[in-house]
Amino acid sequence: MREKSIEVKLVDAVKTAGGVCWKFTSPGTSGVPDRIVLMPSGRIAFVEVKASGEKLRPPQRLRIRTLRRLGFKAFVLDNPEQIGGIIDAIQTP
């Protein structure tokens, strides 16, 4: 499945769950995740969306490792079937 199709499904699912899913860009810093997910009760996570079967580039792997090391939840999404699990994981303390 194409990245854009998966991204649209993520945005819709987050909205349905009561959150927002903003496009995330950071000029001057390559490899930041595509989306920042903000859920009720102050839950936050970052999601890198890839086309089905597509691999992370080295800068993307680095940014995800950094976010996780700092205590943030960071996910790689390449299949729409993962969306429910990601949303559940974001909402879990």
Image (cartoon, rainbow, N blue to C red):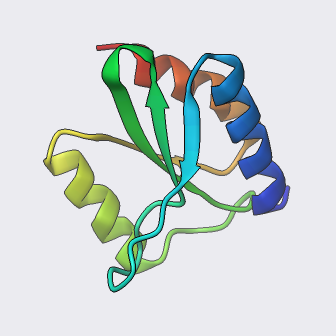
Q: Height in image: 5 above or below 60?
A: above
Number of marks in the rendered image: 0
How far across and how far down the image is residue 57, in percent?
47, 77
Q: Is residue 35 left or right of residue 71?
A: right
Image quadrant occupied by the N terminus = bottom right
Front residue of 71/19: it is: 19
Q: Tell me which corner region of the image, top left, top right, bottom left or bottom right, holds residue 44.
A: top left
Q: Height in image: 25 above or below 6?
A: below
Query: Which residue: 39% across, 72% down?
Result: 26
How far across and how far down the image is residue 78, in percent?
67, 51
Front residue of 27/67: it is: 27
Image quadrant occupied by the C terminus = top left
How far across and how far down the image is residue 23, in percent?
57, 56
Q: Height in image: 55 above or below 30?
A: above
Query: Which residue: 45% across, 32% down?
Result: 38
Query: Which residue: 74% across, 31% down?
Result: 81
